[in-house]
Amino acid sequence: MNNYQRYGFFLCLLLVTLITACAPVKTLDVWQDETYTKPLQKVLVIAITHEGFIRNQFENVLADKLSAQGVHAIPSNKVLPQLDKNLDRETVVAEVRKHGIDNVLVARAINRKQITNHQYGGVYYGGTAVYDNGWHSYAYGSFYSREYDTDYFTVATKLFDIDQTHPIWTYLAQIKVTGAKQGTINDFIPYLVEELVKSKLIQ
């Protein structure tokens, strides 16, 4: 390899590194129960947040994307408009059964750390459990709402079969927020759907 080729190689490597570093969404982990082979059919989409407009947009946009892939997706804001900490498990389970839902997908922020342009190193992820018990216990809590300029936070998305207590699929992602939250949602959801396709849960 001559000097010109070597220079071109390192330039390409630098560009790839910069593009990756600036990407709005970084996949941290994907886990799947390999014994679960059923494709998604009818899914309830739940976004845990105390900001109603964020919940509605996340659920509606994701439901639309899933529907475009042939999955019957229902935003929880259509059937459980008052989903919050005061909503008891029995009410949620009854609504799921009523609509003949097979799977529940729950997305929520589990950790975040403010980052300024002068800080170095990565984002530290605490010991928050990612693989816990059933969907009805996971679908409670809230996103953080503190104002930010540049923000990195972690979203854990879990997919459950309603007849099982443990998730069948999980997706952990770091998301960079530099503008409107709505734009961040629009950036994140295609990554989420792509991972579901890769896992062959969407066929």
Image: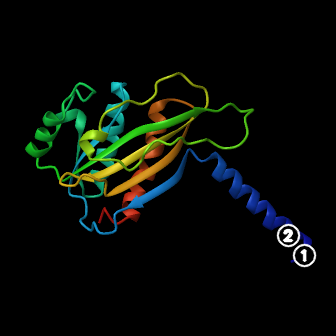
12 horizontally vs 183: left or right:
right
Q: Residues within 10 Å of mark 1 (few under 14, many from 20)?
A: few
Which residue position holds label 1? 2
Whether tag 2 and tag 1 are in contact, CB under 8 A, the answer is: yes
Taking the spot 45% from the left edge, 38% from the top edge, the residue there is 110
Q: CA distance from mark 2 to mark 1?
A: 6 Å
Image quadrant assignment for residue 93: top left
Identity, as a three-letter code, of the amino acid under mark 2: Arg
Taking the spot 46% from the left edge, 24% from the top edge, the residue there is 145
Per the rendering, the mark at residue 109 is none
Pick the front one: 9 or 48: 48
* Tag 1 secondary structure: loop
Q: Residue 61: image x %, image y %?
A: 34, 41
Asked if residue 93 is positioned above or below residue 147 in the image, the reply reads below
Asked if residue 95 is positioned above or below residue 5 in the image, the reply reads above
Q: Residue 30: image x %, image y %?
A: 45, 57
Residue furthest top in the image: 147
92 horizontally vs 151: left or right:
left
Query: Which quadrant of the figure contains the N terminus?
Result: bottom right
Taking the spot 86% from the left edge, 65% from the top edge, the residue there is 7
Query: Which quadrant of the figure contains the C terminus?
Result: bottom left
Q: Residues within 10 Å of mark 2 (few under 14, many from 20)?
A: few
Taking the spot 52% from the left edge, 53% from the top edge, the residue there is 27
Image quadrant assignment for residue 194: bottom left
Which residue position holds label 2? 6
Identity, as a three-letter code, of the amino acid under mark 1: Asn
Q: How is the image coloured?
A: rainbow
Q: Residue 106: image x %, image y %?
A: 32, 43
149 horizontally vs 171: left or right:
right
* Tag 2 secondary structure: helix
98 horizontally vs 164: left or right:
left
